[in-house]
Amino acid sequence: MGAFAGVDLHKRVSQMAVLWEQQGREPSQLRFGNDVKTVDGILGQLPARSHIAVEAMGSWWWFVEKARSLGHEVCLSHPKQTKAIASARLKSDKVDALMLARLLKADLLPTVWIPTEKQRQVRELLTHRARVVRQRTAVINELEALYAKRNIDFEMTGRRGRPIISGAQELSGYGASIVGRNVELLKVLNEQIRDLDQELDRVAKEEPQATRLMSIPGVGPLTAVAVCSSVGDITRFGDAKKLASYFGLVPRVRQSAEHERRGHITKEGNRMVRSLLVEAALGNIRCSKDLTRKHYMGVLKRRGKKIARVAAARKLLAAMFHMMKDQIDYKEYVTRNSAQ
């Protein structure tokens, strides 16, 4: 069966606690550098097919792949839930590693899904695109502020292509040169975003589930790929409500005895995907008159615009769940729902 190990992974060093199969043998504690040769040696000392728990954090990729390549079984612990189960007064790397190993051995460790290598690469590409878009937004905001300080009307055309700004010659001081540099920077950023969108479009066409999702009016390659790479195997979710909870689109519930209070949405999960779902839902509402629009208009009259947008995103995500689960396109999904 192998040993049970918990790893407190850091950027340059890691701490491993090992619970051995032999009765009466004390747990081992190992602290080691994260260079490939050292990690190979440490993991090679473990019995074959050992179980290793690693806390999910930014740089777990390489360690998980290395441990798996040596034949070990690896799982990622859910940081928030693990902390709630095993809070301790003493906080140290040794304590954390040992706690992970003990929870893993007792089958009490809250775990998170490990995406495939392809899914991780696509998610990395999506994150990079979002970062480039934020940079473009920051540049445009700086340009608007530059003109606002001088009380000059700001006019910009082609902000997503080759931007042209009128009135730069009217700026005092270094304003005109700053505008020139920012315009050149925008050209570069727009070109990068265009290239990234082309690559994501290619990824979407190669992924059957993404192709199905793009049959929904208002859902493009970006949203389809983001949802598919975050969901992975749709059978992980028992129903549409669990999928909505995964993306943080369900309200918080506080219950005591007979009293139940529902608050704002939890906002758990991937913030970027959640935003894309809201944008896609609004696009769907504008270009079609199907189930999502009817649901949105009903909630809009009762609860207002903000809550209606979230409700529409949740409705859209429910449609995506059934489409992915039943492997049908949007037209077939609407037909089935209309017949019920």
Image (tube, rainbow, N blue to C red):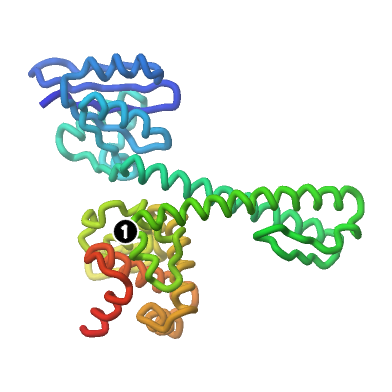
Q: Position of residue 309 (x, y in %)?
A: 45, 72
**Residue 62 lies in quadrant:** top left
Which residue lies at the image location 22% right of the left edge and 15% below the top edge? 45
Q: Position of residue 307 (x, y in %)?
A: 44, 73
The residue furthest left is 23
Name the side, left or right, on which 334 lies relative to 4. right
Q: Position of residue 182 (x, y in %)?
A: 75, 50
**Residue 23 lies in quadrant:** top left
Residue neighbourhood size for the residue with mark 1, other residues' Cα within 10 Å, grouped as few (<14), some (14–19), many (≥20): some
Name the side, left or right, on which 270 lies relative to 212. right
* Depth order, front residue of 266/201: 201
Number of labels in the image equals 1
Which residue lies at the image location 46% right of the left edge and 61% below the top edge? 276
Q: What kind of element bears circle 1?
A: helix
Which residue lies at the image location 37% right of the left edge and 33% below the top edge? 60
Name the side, left or right, on which 137 lies relative to 73. right
Is residue 124 positioned above or below 94 on the image?
A: below
Looking at the rendered image, the quarter that the N terminus falls into is top left
Is residue 275 positioned above or below 18 on the image?
A: below
Residue type for callout 1: Pro
Q: Is residue 197 visible?
A: yes
Q: Position of residue 320 (x, y in %)?
A: 32, 66
* Depth order, front residue of 309/235: 235
Looking at the rendered image, the quarter that the C terminus falls into is bottom left
Q: Is residue 309 visible?
A: no
Which residue lies at the image location 41% right of the left edge and 42% below the top edge? 121
**Residue 44 lies in quadrant:** top left
Where does label 1 land, which residue? 208
Name the side, left or right, on which 323 lies relative to 133. left
